[in-house]
Image: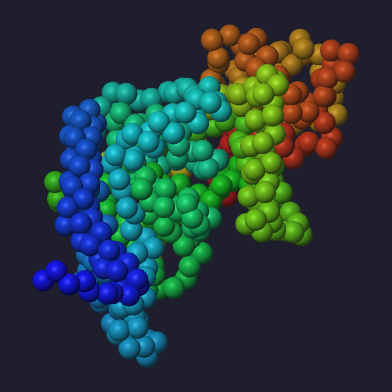
Amino acid sequence: MTEFVNLPLWLVILCGVFVVWALLDHLLIPSVRWFIRRRVNIVINEINEKLDLKLPAFTLTRRKVLIDRLTYDLQVLEAVDEYCKENDVPKEVAMEKVEQYAREIVPSFNAYFYFRIGSWLNKFLARLLYRVRIGFADEKSLESVDPNSSVVFIMNHRSNMDYMLLSYLAINRVALSFAMGEWARFWPVQQLARALGAFCVRRSSKNPLYRRVLARYVQMATEAGVVQAVYPEGMLTKDGRLCPPRIGLLDYMLRSFDPTQERDLVFIPVGVNYDRVLEDRTLIFGLDPKAARKSTLGALRTTLAFILHNLWLMMRRRWHRFGYAIVNFGTPVSMKEYVKKHKVDFRSLRKEERIEKVQVLASELMEKVSKLIPVAPVPLIASVFAENPKKNFSDLEIKGRVQSLIEELEKKGARVYIPRSDRDYTVEVGLRMLTLRHIVLENDQLYQASPEEMDILRYYSNSIAHFLHPFNDLD
């Protein structure tokens, strides 16, 4: 019993690894999981007491469970059978594709990350970069929304900051889920976005099986009461104007909407505008079909250079925030009331007829959004110079034209944001932003649009151009 046994070193190391793994697996890891789960549950309970719309059980369900539910959903299985017959593909192969799509689409929402880290990050970035303001909100109508409703924020898409801005302003009321395009499908952006509740969408995919899986996920989330943010334009505007609405996600939501059920589907129109869009030059560059497209590495290099340049300005105390970022919240649109008023049931319509009806609704929602887009100082001043690109303006002439333009816009129903309720200060703020960027040039107290920056001026003036022209002219 006291004899020594000689063992190879590799075997000792292997046994040690197994012992450490056993300790972790049976003692430490369960304890850590319990501690983390307990902290998350405390956060969820605290947050749910404050939120106007509680976190639905669907949002808090484990991602693996949601993936399995989506993969083996009856409607998805029917789509698999159709796909197999049409393409002469074994069912096992089709199911592998479905599971791959489900893993790609389904988010991994983390309440602790969203309300502790994500909310702090959104607040920090939004307030660091902009003077964030709510220009208008139909508070009475918003407060009357049934807490059991499925709420969808419908908003225009000007910047990748849109979601951060909206989630920052709505953090004490709701937790938002949103569609994430292909651009964000790289580490670690995809993982972070999923933890914040984003679901991935291949916007350009024509694969019918993928579209059926995506449609079913959107329907499941909507039916469960997940609060979502949708951009009907489907992409960032490149010229500053509103883009015609796309109906994909709206169609997915409406084709399964049952007006006889207790849960309503409510669309809340939202308008957003900025004094400076972070991606403005990149977006305008994309208007030229002959321009060479940047690689992902090139885009990252440009982004890094932009960040470093602004950090250098901060260090030299020459950095200024990018002006105002303004959000307006409109009157909610109840689908129960809508289908009753128009005597339509989207579930019973043929595809062509349903698409036509959804397109009508999408246009109506987009028109409501267009009327909510705030008139910020920079778009206001940019409109003056875009009208007369070769004219030299004195400070007094600019103020006079801005005064006339404000009156004209307000007659058209636009919501003009006047900082400090001072129109002279509005002109000062907008003009300062444009001159700092050398978009407007100053010479002997006279101001003129830079001939090389006319595309940028038009980009900002186009954001409010629909108030001066019929909405349909933008299609």
Which residue appears farthest toward the front when viewing the image?
2
Which residue is pictured at 68% across the width and 54% down the height? 298
In the rendered structure, the answer to whether residue 31 lies left or right of residue 313 reads: left
In the rendered structure, the answer to whether residue 39 lies left or right of residue 409 reads: left
* Number of on-image labels: 0
Which residue is pictured at 29% across the width and 69% down the height? 12
Which residue is pictured at 38% across the width and 51% down the height? 194
- Whether residue 433 is visible, yes or no, is no
Q: Nearer the viewer, residue 169 or 235?
A: 169
Which residue appears farthest toward the bottom when viewing the image?
88
Which residue is pictured at 32% across the width and 35% down the height? 115
In the rendered structure, the answer to whether residue 136 lies left or right of residue 444 reads: left
Which residue appears farthest toward the right when viewing the image?
444
Q: What is the quadrant of residue 41 in the picture?
A: top left
Vertical side of 18 occupied by 139: above or below? above
* Coordinates of residue 183 in the picture (x, y in percent): 53, 55
Q: Nearer the viewer, residue 346 or 228?
A: 228
Q: Nearer the viewer, residue 267 or 308?
A: 308
Q: Quadrant of the N terminus?
A: bottom left
* Coordinates of residue 416 in the picture (x, y in percent): 54, 21
